Image: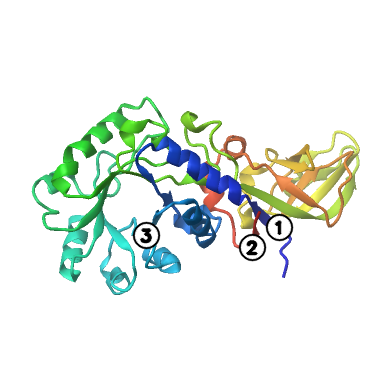
Amino acid sequence: MDAPNRLRLDGAALVENWRALARMSGAAACGAAVKADGYGLGAAEVVARLEQAGCRDFFVATWAEAAALARKDLSISVLHGLRAADLPVAGQLPARPVLNTVAQVQRWRESGAGPCDIMVDTGMNRLGVSPDDIATGLLDGLPVETLMSHLASAEEQDAPINHHQRAALDAIAVRSGARRISLANSAGIALGSDYAFDLTRPGVALYGGVPSAGLAGVIRPVVTIEAEVLQRRAVPTGGRVGYNLTWTAERDSIVAVVNLGYADGYRRAFSGRGLAYVGETAVPVIGRVSMDLTAMDVTGLDVGEGDWIAFDSDLPHASAASGVSQYELLTGLGRRFDRIWV
């Protein structure tokens, strides 16, 4: 059944974003974070396109996400490591755990100690073993494929913590015994070649996000929300629209109501702030975005019931308008959309 709203997904833009990030990564390999179902786009479809373009390293958050993608010819790393409950699944899947704690390292050793990745905390205080743990032999004898850390403030290009984290990772790299070293996320790639090491791990920028000034003008939009018009209605001067009647017509107006709302991931924060397009003409979102419906002022435009309206695909612009992060706008995209790759 055709849905009354859809995501138009630009596969060529996705691939070109990855290629641009790969060029910026220099001699380092460029992987792809495809957690959260490919940041809301559909992980299997994202992997298929990036693999064809040359990407060989993919990162997910959980073993369930790994299971959905599992293939013996893919390099898949599971960022959240290895809980005791994950052991039966981990033993069956062609994926590597990214071990984050001393207990996880011990658990992996006891399970047979196949190839693994290691997260080391270099200052974010989120996930990762400590450099001191590595220095005192925690990883000795372990077949470590990739030693990685995560930048806390990569989008702030002058933040002192960036240099501190890079230096801390560099200092422990040899002692870890790892075959590869990885630090840079999307914004980290823009910090320069010193941050690339052997492998970069872009995420949001693949999907059209621009997390730092260093990526402005480089990254192309990938996702466009489109919704079908349910009703075209006339609202006279002084008429009000939506829950709590927050919008008042300052002239005789034509309003289009579409099949889209916060249950789909079009956030309530776009109320009175969002932007949509009828063809090439920008139209404002008016009144409150509700669970399943959103209204636009389409006065003077030829659009009616059954037509489709596109919403702002510029993630930095949409984020600034709504106050919602680019990451949340992507990963919050709901399951009711048809996802159509073009």
Is label 1 in contact with label 2 (beta carbons under 8 Å)?
Answer: yes
Q: Position of residue 121 (x, y in %)?
A: 25, 44
Q: Residues within 10 Å of mark 3 (few under 14, many from 20)?
A: many
Residue placed most toward the observer, 98 or 94: 94
SS at badge 3: strand
Quadrant of the image occupied by residue 111: bottom left
Q: Position of residue 39 (x, y in %)?
A: 50, 53
Residue 5 has which mark?
1
The residue most toward the left is: 136
Q: Is residue 20 rendered to the left or right of residue 295?
A: left
> Which quarter shows the N terminus?
bottom right
Q: How is the image coloured?
A: rainbow
Circle 2 sits on which residue? Answer: 336
Q: Position of residue 284 (x, y in %)?
A: 75, 38
Residue 76 has which mark?
3
Q: CA distance from mark 2 to mark 3?
A: 28 Å
> Which quarter shows the C terminus?
bottom right
Quadrant of the image occupied by residue 5: bottom right
Q: Against 330, is 322 above or below? A: above
SS at badge 1: strand
Mark 1: amino acid: Asn
